[in-house]
């Protein structure tokens, strides 16, 4: 029994490590741009304005999903054409779209995820 539990634990740890291999992380960024200008009209009046534009973006992890992965619905992008959920073998399913690269070109993958437990979806197919 102990050996069986240890093997299961090893399998879970290896599966977790393998599932994060394809992940890439974008660092968070914060940057501001300042603009200041002073102008003088022909009648001699002076006007000054200042403008500040800041961007704050949190870090983000991007990971390609694979068939069999367990995901949250928010981790994949909804399909732009097939928007309606459907039932398959008693489970709620939906189409998704994912962008990726292949040989230095952008490709669009389509796939199907099905809800196997509340807020837990399994990737059934991706092509």
Image (spheres, rainbow, N blue to C red):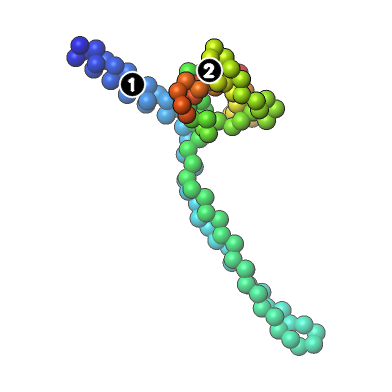
- Residue corresponding to mark 2: 91
Counting from the top left corner in percent of width and height, residue 2 is at: 19, 14
Q: Is residue 12 left or right of residue 5?
A: right
Residue at the far right: name it.
42
Quote the CA–CA distance across marks 1 and 2: 25 Å
User: Camera-side residue: 95 or 55?
Assistant: 95
Question: Vertically, is 24 above or below 126?
Answer: below
Residue, x 46% and y 32% (percent of image)?
23
User: Camera-side residue: 119 or 75?
Assistant: 119
Residue, x 50% and y 35% (percent of image)?
62
Near mark 2 (Cα within 10 A), the count class, few <14, some 14-19 or many ≥20, is: some
State the SS at label 1.
helix
Residue 69 visible, this angle: no
Choose top left, top right, bottom left or bottom right for residue 10. top left
Question: Vertically, is 42 above or below 122?
Answer: below
Q: Quadrant of the N terminus?
A: top left
State the SS at label 2.
strand
Residue, x 37% and y 21% (percent of image)?
15
Of label 1 and label 2, which has the lower sequence position? 1
Q: Quadrant of the C terminus?
A: top right
- Residue corresponding to mark 1: 12
Question: Vertically, is 47 above or below 94?
Answer: below
Counting from the top left corner in percent of width and height, residue 113 is at: 54, 22
Residue, x 61% and y 20% (percent of image)?
86
Counting from the top left corner in percent of width and height, residue 124 is at: 53, 17
Counting from the top left corner in percent of width and height, residue 81 is at: 70, 27
Near mark 1 (Cα within 10 A), the count class, few <14, some 14-19 or many ≥20, is: few
């Amino acid at each position: 029994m102990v050996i069986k539990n240890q093997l299961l634990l090893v399998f879970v740890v290896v599966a977790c490590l393998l599932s994060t291999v394809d992940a890439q992380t974008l660092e968070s960024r914060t940057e501001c741009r300042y603009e200041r200008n002073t102008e003088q009209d022909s009648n001699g009046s002076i006007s000054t304005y200042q403008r500040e534009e800041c961007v704050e973006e949190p870090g983000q992890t991007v990971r390609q999903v694979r068939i069999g992965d367990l995901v949250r619905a928010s981790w994949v992008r909804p399909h732009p054409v097939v928007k309606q959920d459907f039932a398959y073998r008693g489970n709620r399913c939906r189409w998704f779209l994912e962008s990726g690269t292949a040989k230095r070109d952008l490709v669009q993958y389509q796939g199907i995820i099905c809800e196997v437990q509340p807020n837990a979806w399994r990737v059934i197919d991706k092509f």
